[in-house]
Image (tube, rainbow, N blue to C red):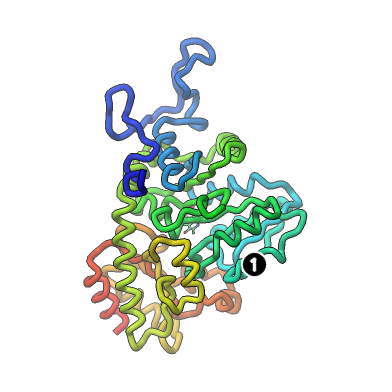
Amino acid sequence: MKFNTKTIHGGQEHDKAYGAVMPPIYQTSTYAQSTPGGHKGFEYSRTHNPTRKALENGFASLENGTHGLAFASGMAAIDAVIKLLKPGDEVISTNDLYGGSYRIFTKIFADFGIKFHFIGMENADKIASYVNDNTKLIWIETPTNPMMNIIDIKAAAKIAKSHNILLGVDNTFATPYLQRPLDLGADIVMHSATKYLGGHSDVVMGALVVKDDALAERLYFIQNSCGAVSGPQDSFLMLRGLKTLHVRMQRHCENGKAVAHYLASHPEIEKVYWPGFETHPNHDIAKDQMDDFGGMISFTTKGNSYENAIKIVERLNIFTLAESLGGVESLAGHPASMTHASIPKEEREKTGVVDSLIRLSVGIEDADDLIADLKQAIG
Ligand SMILES: *Cc1c(COP(=O)(O)O)cnc(C)c1O
């Protein structure tokens, strides 16, 4: 089955009771048993729920995995991955990680005796020099947020394999439409399904997909033991979102390309960060591991004025000033005052998050309207 068919049919079967084309919302916590243990595969909805199961099978299908797991949020999915580790274990991760991931690693799991290394991975070979006997996990994001750096997944997988370390990839920005990390050698794919997978800014959810039975078993055990599962209503909405992932992503990519080129041609714009440009330092890797370049773009303005950046995001009409990304509607964010405000100026500027940086999640509206909106806002 090809990807555009999988988004609709992957892992899905019609409802056995009445042939409903969409899986019913099984809004139930428990299931009747005829005799102790005499059930139809479902006992309690923290452990299993038929609506969630349909969604989990959909996630697995899209990422070319064999097992999917749906969580209450992207952070709950990451939380489950780190719970595979023990005190003394070490993790190698990237230095421009999603802020929430950085926070859970440094403010929650560091206190449990897990050590994290945050390094630049533009050259993935650098990862090897941080590996020691305690290293158990390499955790990467590509493209990264908000600097749109690209990390070579195949190269990271090679290092992970040769040292018997797990490689986890946060595939939120790319989605399986653009990039399938399990095919490139990763062990775990993670999503904030809140973003592109759901696609309509109406659900908070996380996902994990793996293709190894033993690893899946350990993750299901953690999911059931800790209990941060997605509910049946949200699972239904997410499944509905998945069915249009391919058509939405196609338009996100087209609009992203149009907006990136417009910004690059604007005399007031200093720099545009988008992996589709040949001048992007890892454009060749992006071309190799992604099928297109997506709708996430960051840019800076000449003079690097904080006030001017605020003015631009306030003037935007079609782009909504908001956190988050990946929905059908275009969003704009100012990392220095929003997502990265808690990081000291010198620290954030080291990774490129300067005062004038603006991040766009280009939606699926008409590209001409989006460009006209940017034009009037930038002036
Ligand atoms: C939003 C996001 C997360 C966290 O997911 P939630 O669903 O908000 O918990 C993790 N990684 C990336 C790249 C994200 O954008």
Residue 291 image-quadrant placement = bottom left
Give left or right: position of 169 versus 314: right
272 and 66: which is toward the camera = 66
Q: Residue at x 31, y 73 (%)?
A: 259
110 and 215: which is toward the camera = 215
Q: Residue at x 33, y 24 (%)?
A: 16
Q: Secondary structure at mark 1?
A: helix
Give left or right: position of 88 versus 100: right
Q: Position of residue 156 (x, y in %)?
A: 60, 60
Q: Is residue 122 above or below residue 289?
A: below
Residue corresponding to mark 1 = 125
Q: Position of residue 105 (x, y in %)?
A: 63, 57
Question: Image quadrant for the N terminus?
Answer: top left
Give left or right: position of 127 versus 251: right
Bin the neighbour count of mark 1 within 10 Å (Cα to Cα): few under 14, some 14-19, many 20 and up: few
Q: Position of residue 376 (x, y in %)?
A: 26, 80
Q: Residue at x 42, y 53 (%)?
A: 176
Residue 111 visible in image = no
Question: Image quadrant for the C terminus?
Answer: bottom left
